[in-house]
Amino acid sequence: MQEKKEEDPQQALNKVSEVGIDEVGKGAIFGPVFSAVVVLTKKNISILKQFGVTDSKKLTPKKRKLLLPKILLLCSDYGIGQSSAREIDNLGIRVATELSMIRALKKLKEKPSELIIDGPLLLRPWQGIQKNIVSGDSKFISIASASIFAKVSRDNLMERLEKKYSGYFIFKNKGYGTREHLSLIRKYGITKLHRKSFLKKSNLI
């Protein structure tokens, strides 16, 4: 009986908590892939919904930056992880993305009993219950919050990297393969933060 009692508070906590994880930068040709995980109670989910938290792609950069402090204040826990361009080239994008997710999860104070992941792909290294939700960032506030956290964090890094890698308009394209970005690579060549494995497919290297 004693063992059952010890489990009860944790079971009660799990019922009121939602743990969402999402990645940003998977399709970029420059820089790391970022993943964020956010833990929310039911009460704070409804508060963040009222604040306008939704899929980060549907929000302006200004709105995302305004929402992030509210998310970090209201969440019970959070973590962020990344995987470098070199890791993406060496391991492949899926394994590198999983690595960034595991790094984010390791920052949490407690291992979640259930994880809600945006998209159809399982997080293969994760030993625990997980649910894959296609378009999860528009269905679950915890995933939407994670997508905002990851997006703002990655965008901030891209803005800082602009100083070091000027000429590629990283602050504008955020490392994605826009027509302008690809033409600048043809003009100036690649940097050590460009994903060689991605650029080979475009016959740029």
Image (cartoon, grey):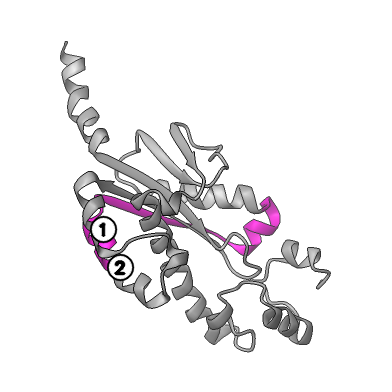
Note whether 56 is above or below 161 in the view shown. above
Residue appearing at x 55%, y 75% in the figure: 174
> Mark 1 near mark 2, Cβ–Cβ under 8 Å?
yes
Percent position (x, y) of residue 18?
31, 42
Q: Nearer the viewer, residue 111 or 146?
A: 146
Element class at badge 2: helix
Q: Which mark is residue 86?
A: none
Quarter location, residue 191: bottom right
Note whether 129 is above or below 55 in the view shown. above
Q: Is residue 135 left or right of residue 173?
A: left
Note whether 104 is above or below 50 in the view shown. above
The part of the chain drawn in magenta is 69-92
Residue appearing at x 72%, y 78% in the figure: 182
Q: Residues within 10 Å of mark 1 (few under 14, many from 20)?
A: many
Where, quadrant-wise, is the C terminus in this rendering? bottom right
Q: Please check the rendered image and state whether residue 91 is part of the magenta-colored stretch, yes or no.
A: yes
Q: Residue furthest top?
A: 1
Percent position (x, y) of residue 94?
63, 49
Q: Nearer the viewer, residue 95 or 56?
A: 56
If you read the primary sequence from the N terminus, does the residue marked by circle 1 or circle 2 appear first?
1
Q: Which mark is residue 48?
A: 1
Kind of residue indicated by mark 2: Leu
The total of numbered circles placed on residues is 2
Q: Is residue 172 left or right of residue 5?
A: right
Q: Label 1 vs label 2: CA separation?
A: 9 Å
Percent position (x, y) of residue 77?
28, 50
Kind of residue indicated by mark 1: Leu
